[in-house]
Amino acid sequence: MNEQTAAARPSESETRLFFTAVWAIVWKDLRIERHTRQTISVMAMFSVVTVVMFNFALEANMDAARNVSTGLLWATILLAGTLGLNRSLAIERENQTMDAMLMAPIHRNAIYLGKVISITLFTLALEAILVLLFIIFFDKPLWRPMVLLVLVLGTIGYVAAGVIVTSMTIQSRSREVLLPVLLLPLSLPLVLPAATAVAMYMFPQPPTWGEVQSAVYIVIIYDLLMVTAGFLTYHFVVES
Amino acid sequence: MTSITSARLDKSIRIANWAAAIAIMVSLLVIFFYAPVERTMGNVQRIFYFHVGSAWVGAVALFVALISGMLYLRQNDRKWDTVSLASVEIGLVFLTMATVAGSVWGKPAWNTWWLWSPRLTLITIAWLTYAAYFMLRGAIEDEERRARFAAVYVIVAFVTIIMAYISVRILRDIHPVVIGSTLESAQGASEGLQEFSGLDSAKMGITLLISTSAFSLLYVAWLLNRIRLQQLADAVKNLKIQVTAHLQGEHAS
């Protein structure tokens, strides 16, 4: 009905269309997850097993485990994250929904952003479980708001890189093996400062902003760079 | 295509090879006989010219790979994929050379071969990221897709180089900074760590300039040779296809 205004301001309606498409993709993924409960349950199972395994690796030495618990937390998130990425994008290929999305008259970057948001949400759900487990197992103050903020920021950058890389590896021969080999080195420049920042909050006395700001800034810079790289290259990855 | 398949080297490649060889010889002479002995480090400091030269070329090569990857995506021309692949290969070799030279320097300077300082860690990460580039190429059979994915990966992987550059200027590090300024907190002096005083004399600056130029020439020569090698490999592949088609045609008739 508002054709005239839509024509007069095409950019605004285009933006709205873009975000409608993004939201549709996120909503689709969330609904699939609600029905199947595959991605998060697999990630959560894997994480619990990994945490128990780390405990065995540290020979039930609780002090050692406590000291390295933030590193363990990030390692578990990264490993479980590759599972979630593989799962979420494999579903698209198996059901040929990726072809359908590519045929739809939406921008490729809407697909990218939609996948990044939905997989970030899955990973955050997993992190909620993990943080609870780590608080119980290792008795660390992971509930602090800054810790949660760094976890969220780190997850965004990791998933932004992960969606690009997984979209490529999933079209290759050795997809399950290739993904961690490509993605883990790529995400380490993000995880190192993020883990450092989280580790600083593990002391009884939380650090001042000045002490953690450089680490947090590096995480934010990585997020921006990776999302930009994803926006620039995603359509080359999915078109074939 | 016919000129590529000839066994003789192109004139430009021959010139580049000779220029690089002579430049490396000159830089060796300059490093060992012209450059002064550094005050605190002594003769060990001469490694610095190799280290900086190869680190510089490593960064340039990976930047060239990034640019040619972008050009490939834009123009869809196979030659840019070849340049990108050649540049990543050579960049990885130079990064390895820089790391080994740095390690040899680190033993007397820091009393250890390796430290997990931010810069060294990030270089290792960048090295791993670019090593994975070949795994990606090896896993994709379709040539056009392989080239496209490789170009995308080179663009994404360059983020690790940018991060390494940013991080060492923000984070506290033991590694001396030669080019560009750092925040005061990034210098190791406050921790009583080995402080490199920078270039003491003009002679050192000249030596560094010569060795860096020599390494850059070496890079250009290697790049030209590597591109030719790839073109020869492609030509062989085409010939094979032609022969197979020919034989099958004979068989059918």
Image (cartoon, coloured by chain):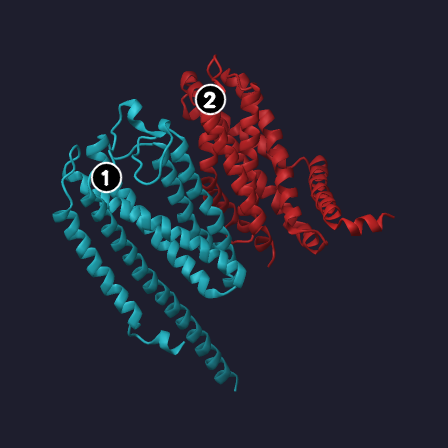
Query: Residue A99 location, x and y as percent?
Result: 67, 54
What is the count of numbered marks? 2
Name the image quarter holding residue B101: top left
In this view of the protein, which residue sits in the foreground, A156 or B139?
A: A156
Looking at the image, which residue is at 39% across and 51% down?
A: B62
Q: Name chain A's colour.
A: red
Name the image quarter holding residue B222: bottom left
**Residue receiving disc 2:** A210
A18 on left or right of A229: right
Looking at the image, which residue is at 72% across and 53% down?
A: A104
Residue type indicated by callout 2? Gly
Residue type indicated by callout 1? Leu
B230 on left or right of A221: left
> Element at badge 2?
helix
Q: Chain of mark 1?
A: B
Query: Residue A232 location, x and y as percent?
Result: 56, 50
B39 on left or right of A101: left
**Residue receiving disc 1:** B199
In this view of the protein, which residue sits in the foreground, A144 or A83?
A: A144
Circle 2 crowding by C-alpha within 10 Å: few under 14, some 14–19, many from 20:
few
B218 on left or right of A208: left
In this view of the protein, which residue sits in the foreground, A127 or B208?
A: B208
